[in-house]
Image (spheres, helix red, strand yellow):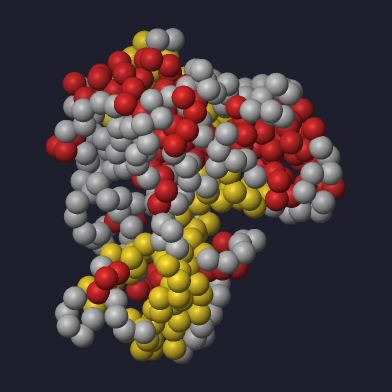
Amino acid sequence: MHPRSLSIKDFDYNLAEEKIAVYPLPERDQSKLLIYQNGEISEDIYRNISNHLPEKSFLIFNDTKVIKARILFQKKTGAFIEIFCLEPYEKINDYAVVLSQKKSTRWKCMIGGAGKWKEKFLEKEIELGGHRIILKAQLVEKLTDAYVVELSWNPGDHSFAEIIDHAGEMPLPPYIKRKAEASDAERYQSIYSHYEGSVAAPTAGLHFTKQIFSSFKEKNIDTGFVTLHVGAGTFKPVKASNMEGHEMHAEWIDVSPEFIKQLIENISRPVICVGTTSLRTVESLYWMGLKTYLNPDIRFEALKINQWDVYEEPLENNVISARSALQSLLKYLQKNKMERLFIQTQIIIAPGYSFKIINGIVTNFHQPKSTLLLLIAAITGEKWKAIYDYAITHNFRFLSYGDGSLLLI
């Protein structure tokens, strides 16, 4: 069956509100870990995850860093307007360049209380480096699903990264029904987060500690890092009855040729992705590589993986080995003297998808009727129901600050 025809009601389960973790555990690696392998379910804690990974595994992590994307402006009337920065509203070649901008920047945003915004500017005073800075927001344009907001600040000699870090709050997911606290600035980031750009955490990585990374060496487990900047679209509900009516969110990936070389070197080992974002990145690399294999002179923009690309011609029936696809992609980057692969992927991974690179995933438990749950079903088949039933009846904590699972193909 083509995933277009999937009915989202077949990927539903009863998630009681008390099962949703509102706070993380005091110690990251004490979270429970469900292990699914060879059709069997067992459990442990994250601190012992290396005992359950195949020996000589290659683990891939997403090293994106969450920005404080939620900014509250208080009007003179006392009313609040919330601006949630989703992504830059301009041609993006590098998130670091966008975040280093000074004086002003334009972002695609969601706005809470947009109907109250009558003024030309909203203003917020912040203190940075001992200096008083006035941050202004101006509504530029209304889009179909969001707004374009110009943010400007005076004095303008600080970068937008510095401004948003002082003016904003951590963008906790909408199902965590509390305000962000000071502790979230640390706990809603992985310990290896590095490249700023996400507005939601790749939550599978929140459980990993230095102790866990040390344990990998004993099992000859290697690690690699990709970057996918997680957008708010990761929480976008599937409202259409069939998947054909759902538009998958697009996200920016940022991968170095060095990582692609590392992946080629480890392609014969068990490849385990930590998180759905890492998995979507790695599988997208295969299809981008196939595109360059089929057309070595393909325009760079055409490498983007659109929602249904991998299920239809010309990609569907032109399957090559993972090694060949990655080597072709690497050759393309070298030929075009590209130091990084920075491009969007809109890939949707659902039952019917044939995995090309990965052999498993470490991931949290996801919302009912979500594209993330479709991805889990693509890995485990109908067993996803037994896995989630086990997690519910054995008191696992769900969603971003909850427990997680190791699912092996």
| Rendered position, 296 above or below 32 | below
The residue depicted at 23 percent of the width and 34 percent of the height is 397
Residue 34 appears anywhere in the view: no
Foreground pick, 161 / 350: 350
Q: Residue at x 65, y 45 (%)?
A: 304
Q: In terms of image quadrants, where is residue 326?
A: top right
Residue 409 in percent (x, y) is at 50, 17
Q: Residue 49 location in percent, x, y?
A: 40, 27
Residue 209, horizontal then vertical, whole percent: 40, 42
* Direction from residue 44 to residue 223 in the image, left or right: right
Asked if residue 383 shows in the view, the reply is yes
**In this view, 187 is above or below 216:** below
Q: Position of residue 174 (x, y in %)?
A: 27, 51
Which residue is at 29% across, 23% downward? 388
- State how many labels appear: 0
In this view, 272 is above or below 164:
above
Side of 145 where 100 appears, left or right = right
Seen at 25% across and 59% down, the residue is 180
Q: Which image quarter: residue 260?
A: top right
Q: Classify residue 153 as left or right of residue 347.
A: left
Above or below, comparing residue 303 to residue 272 in the picture: below
